[in-house]
Image (tube, rainbow, N blue to C red):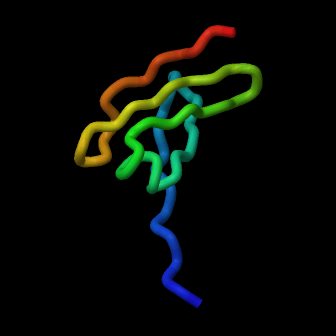
Amino acid sequence: MGPMPPPPITVEVEPGVLVEVPHFAAHVSRKYTAKYGNNRWLIRFNHTGTVRSVRKKLG
């Protein structure tokens, strides 16, 4: 069995709404669509893995 994957990153998309983003999405693809209830957010990360922008998706 190989090593365990790195832990997910917790991001606050709205005040009081936290979502967990997989490590791969933050550091490699640098973009992640988070879903919480009926809401969706597009979270983008910079090259160091910190949050660059959070945008609520309509629809």
* Picture coordinates of residue 2, whole percent (x, y): 53, 86
The residue at 27%/38% (across/down) is: 46
* Picture coordinates of residue 6, whole percent (x, y): 46, 67
Q: Is residue 18 rendered to the left or right of residue 31?
A: right
On-image quarter of the N terminus: bottom right
* Picture coordinates of residue 44, whole percent (x, y): 39, 31
Q: How many labels does the image show?
A: 0
Q: Is residue 50 rendered to the left or right of residue 15?
A: left
Near-viewer residue (30 or 38): 30
Image position of 46 with respect to 59: above or below = below
The residue at 48%/46% (across/down) is: 10
Q: Is residue 46 rendered to the left or right of residue 28?
A: left
Image position of 19 with respect to 6: above or below = above
Outermost residue toward the front?
29
Outermost residue toward the top?
58
* Picture coordinates of residue 20, whole percent (x, y): 55, 46
Near-viewer residue (3 or 51): 3
Near-viewer residue (36 or 44): 44
On-image quarter of the C terminus: top right
Outermost residue toward the bottom?
1
Outermost residue toward the right?
37
The residue at 58%/30% (across/down) is: 17
